[in-house]
Amino acid sequence: MAAIESFAIPVPAELIGAARTWAERDAVSVEQFVRRAIEETIAARQDAAYLADRASRGSVADLDRILAKAGAEPPAPGDEIPEGWVSGK
């Protein structure tokens, strides 16, 4: 298990109150709620960085090359785009 480190940070009373409310709703301690919030924020930022990196390596030429391999067959039954789903159609 990773080492546990504690630190104190100033938090506005309104934010602590909201954290207490949500922690109670989730049936966890405020500490668990805050730890989860930190974990989720870090995970979201890591995901965004990963996706940005992947997007930076893509190109329209690659997309066109890949789509050209798809062929011109109509979609299989059930794979059609629902009517009204795409604007302008």
Image: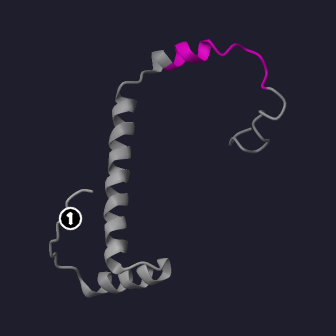
| 55 relative to 74, above or below | below
| 40 relative to 28, above or below | above
* Residue in the picture at 42% in, 21% down: 59
* Residue in the picture at 47% in, 80% down: 27
| 76 relative to 50, above or below | above
Q: Quadrant of residue 36?
A: bottom left
* Residue in the picture at 24% in, 56% down: 2
How far across and how far down the image is residue 13, in percent?
Answer: 26, 87
Tell me where the magenta segment starts and ends, as one range: 63-75
Q: Left of 79 or right of it: where is 34?
A: left
Query: Which amino acid type is marked by label 1?
Result: Ile
Residue 74 forms part of the magenta stretch: yes
Q: Quadrant of residue 29?
A: bottom left
Q: Left of 31 or right of it: where is 82?
A: right
How far across and how far down the image is residue 28, in percent?
Answer: 42, 78
How far across and how far down the image is residue 89, in percent?
Answer: 74, 38
The residue nearer to you, when weighing 59 against 86, is 59
Identify the residue at the far front of this view: 1
**Where's the N terminus, which quadrant?**
bottom left
* Residue in the picture at 35% in, 29% down: 56
The colour scheme used here is: one colour
| 83 relative to 63, above or below | below
State the residue position of label 1: 4
Residue 67 forms part of the magenta stretch: yes
Q: Give the class, few, some or many, for how many residues have Cα within 10 Å of label 1's Cα (few <14, many ≥20).
A: few
Q: Quadrant of residue 51?
A: top left
Looking at the rendered structure, the secondary structure element under dot 1 is: loop
How far across and how far down the image is residue 15, in percent?
Answer: 31, 81
